[in-house]
Amino acid sequence: MSGLPVDLPLTTDRLVLRAHRMDDLDDLVRFHGDPEVVRYVPWPVRDREATEETLRAKLGQTVLDEHGQWLVLAAELASTKTVIGEVLLKWASDRQGELGFAFGREHHGQGYAIEAARAVLGLAFDDLGFHRVTAVVVEGNDPSLRLLDRLGFRQEARHVDGAFFKGEWATTLVLALLEDEWRSSR
Ligand SMILES: CC(C)(COP(=O)(O)OP(=O)(O)OC[C@H]1O[C@@H](n2cnc3c(N)ncnc32)[C@H](O)[C@@H]1OP(=O)(O)O)[C@@H](O)C(=O)NCCC(=O)NCCS
């Protein structure tokens, strides 16, 4: 299997989506340690030390060389150079991907997450030739469902107690967007 060519950074009107750097630590600590932000993502609330450890791992997550790998991008606000969130794309299987995102609470409600997600979907469908991108959301994560709905994702499945998540069973929703749906929504 040959890897996919990922040309970074991706730029949008207000954001630069780029590889993480160690000097992003202060910015990341602000949202990785926020219980509200991590409530529905598969990470625990992280202190500075735990955030630093995961940041080290993210430094290498800038390539899609094999199925199962995640591309993990820092979302930097171009005007201030602050990292306000992260956007992720998994190369799940042949021409199939999975989208993920998390943004700091003070940067919600301004359209930054959707701007970042659109850029990553552009990478997936236009540059990498993906046919289908999914997202898996824990039921109750309404801001994420609103974001995915605005992007044109359709719910395909509801898995009752589909994941043991943060100490309890959680119902998970699987949503998907096909390349044709992406193109017709733009
Ligand atoms: C999911 C998450 C990224 C959504 O963030 P968000 O800021 O609500 O999403 P968007 O970027 O789509 O912003 C939309 C909001 O910004 C408003 N907005 C303001 N300016 C805007 C602009 N220029 N363009 C678009 N929307 C704009 C919209 O009206 C909308 O407000 P509303 O939600 O009150 O209707 C955020 O809630 C989050 O980080 N959650 C925690 C992590 C998480 O659960 N991740 C998902 C795991 S599956």
Image (tube, rainbow, N blue to C red):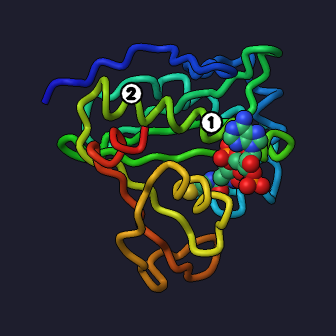
Residue identifier under label 1: 86
- Horizontally, is 61 left or right of 177 in the view? right
Q: Image quadrant for the N terminus? A: top left
Q: Residue at x 18, y 42 (%)?
A: 94
Marks 2,1: beta carbons within 8 A: no
User: Alpha carbon of mark 2 to alpha carbon of mark 1: how far?
Assistant: 15 Å
Residue identifier under label 2: 123
Checking the image for residue 155, the label placed there is none
Q: Is mark 2 within 8 Å of ligand 1?
A: no
Answer with mark 2 or mark 1, whichever residue precedes in sequence.
Answer: 1
Q: Residues within 10 Å of mark 2 (few under 14, many from 20)?
A: some
The one of 113 and 19 positioned closer to us in this rendering: 113
Q: Image quadrant for the C terminus? A: top left
Question: In the figure, 62 relative to 84: above or below?
Answer: above
Q: Residue at x 64, y 19 (%)?
A: 13
The one of 58 and 183 positioned closer to us in this rendering: 183
Question: In the figure, 27 relative to 13: above or below?
Answer: below
Q: Nearer the viewer, mark 2 or mark 1?
A: 2
Q: Position of residue 58 (x, y in %)?
A: 55, 30
Say what amino acid the circle numbered 2 marks.
Answer: Leu
Q: Position of residue 47 (x, y in %)?
A: 81, 45
